[in-house]
Image (cartoon, rainbow, N blue to C red):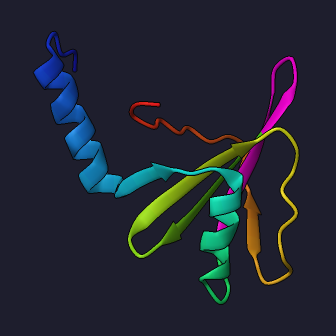
Amino acid sequence: MIYQSGAGHYAVMARAMRAFGMLVRVNPEDFTTILSKNEKPLVVFTEKKFIVSSYHYLTSYKGFIFYTKTKSPMQLTSNVELIQAKSMWVSVYGN
């Protein structure tokens, strides 16, 4: 389906948010703080290689999905359950 207006783009974004929940981009320090609020948090991550590597992480907390990106692997505590994804598509609206 192709939309030709900004309203069409907004409709697609609204449907995506209803389907997947709200995606919130945070810095790595805040991501770690969010993880500490869960007894056994689940984190999905992937490494993307282009010219340099980057690491992308997702976790959920209170109905929100939190995302962060780092240049090196995060040092996570032993209570974090990690799932490495082959790939991950993350679109965070705005900066």
Q: Residue at x 34, y 58 (%)?
A: 21
Measuring 74% from the left and 46% from the top, which residue is drawn there?
Answer: 46
Picture quadrant where residue 58 is located: bottom right
In the rendered image, the residue lying farthest to the bottom is 39
In this rendering, the answer to whether 54 lies above or below 64 is above
Residue at 43% across / 51% down in the picture? 23
Q: Left or right: where does residue 3 sit relative to residue 46?
A: left
Q: Is residue 40 above or below residue 42?
A: below
Residue 13 placement: quadrant: top left
- Residue 32 against residue 8 in the figure, above or below: below
Residue 62 picture location, percent across and down: 41, 76
The spot of residue 34 in percent (x, y) is: 60, 71
Residue 56 point in image, percent of width and height: 70, 45
Total numbered labels: 0
The quarter holding residue 18 reads: bottom left
Between 32 and 43, the residue placed more toward the observer is: 32
Tell me, yes or no, whether the highlighted magenta stretch contains residue 30.
no
Region of the chain picked out in magenta, as a range? 42-54
Q: Nearer the viewer, residue 33 or 38?
A: 33
Q: Is residue 48 magenta?
A: yes
* Residue 27 in the figure: left or right of residue 4: right
Instruction: Tell me which residue sits at (65%, 78%) in the image.
Output: 41
Of the pair 71 and 3, the residue shown nearer to us: 71
Q: Residue furthest top?
A: 4
Q: Is residue 75 left or right of residue 40?
A: right
SS assignment for the magenta stretch, majority: strand
- Which quadrant: the N terminus? top left
